[in-house]
Image (tube, helix red, strand yellow):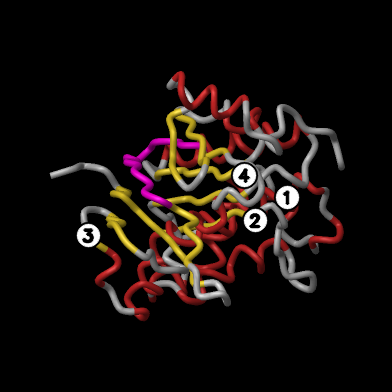
Amino acid sequence: MSDALLELRDLRRSVRLPSGEDLHILRGVDLSVEAGDHVAIVGRSGSGKTTLLNLLGLIDRQSGGELLFDGRDVSRLGERRRARLRGASIGFVFQQFNLLDGRTALENVMMPLMYGTAGQFWRRERLAREMLDRVGLADRADQLPSRLSGGEQQRVAVARALVRRPRLILADEPTGALDVTTGEAVMALLDEIARDSAAALVTITHDLQVAALSRRSFLLDDGVLHDIGDAGARDALAATGGIRAGREAVR
């Protein structure tokens, strides 16, 4: 039996078009991710990265194949149990920070704990302050998002995603709104916290520089996942448009 925290076996996802034809987005994805691992999935726009992220995050259901979380086939779970597992065990970090404008950094980080266990609920302020300290923002806890820089806002978003100590962290283009130096610092922080907490980190990106910061990198092309270390994948990567080799500062 596999020791992987997350395991995908021939994972497929199709949607029915108005014409009655099936659009095959994922054609058979195989992937195994262990606790403490950091995997990057690279692909051009429209390659199915968002679809894969939604499946990993238990937001959507696959059309075929298996998705195992800690050895359990989550496709067999009902919506309520999937939502409970998602809230307790999966943290999301997005390109857009999605912070609540009228709430302080501390209040933003406390929000997930409102729906946590009884112990998390009653200790929510202390846990949130500890996580803000972990990301280097203890002295910014009472600031509104509008008073924070882009890098600080993303670190608040990271703290919010990790405050419930998820076992799986899904980062969707987490540096897309940041300059190169700040983005690398955020990725280093994510990787460090994931490693220290033995969480699995999966980064979805179309930026090769971000992917290079992971331990293993894969290319999603034509609905299939390829190890970038393979010669065939490198050829496919060279022929794939829309993947950035670098980033320009936007903040």
Q: Are marks 4 and 2 in contact (CB under 8 Å)?
A: no
Magenta stretch: helix, strand or loop mostly: strand
Residue hosting label 4: 135
SS category of the residue bearing label 4: loop
Residue hosting label 3: 72
- Mark 2 vs mark 3, foreground winner is 3
Q: CA distance from mark 1 to mark 4?
A: 11 Å
Circle 3 packing at 10 Å, graded few (<14), some (14-19), many (20+), is some
* Image mark for residue 157: 2
Which amino acid type is marked by label 1? Asp
Residues rendered magenta in the picture: 27-40
SS category of the residue bearing label 1: helix
Answer with mark 1 or mark 2, whichever residue precedes in sequence. Answer: 1
Answer with mark 1 or mark 3, whichever residue precedes in sequence. Answer: 3
Q: CA distance from mark 4 to mark 3?
A: 32 Å
Q: Is residue 178 left or right of residue 166?
A: right
Which amino acid type is marked by label 2? Ala
Which amino acid type is marked by label 4? Val
Circle 1 packing at 10 Å, graded few (<14), some (14-19), many (20+), is few
Residue hosting label 1: 139
Between residue 43 and residue 147, name the one nearer to us: 43
* Image mark for residue 212: none
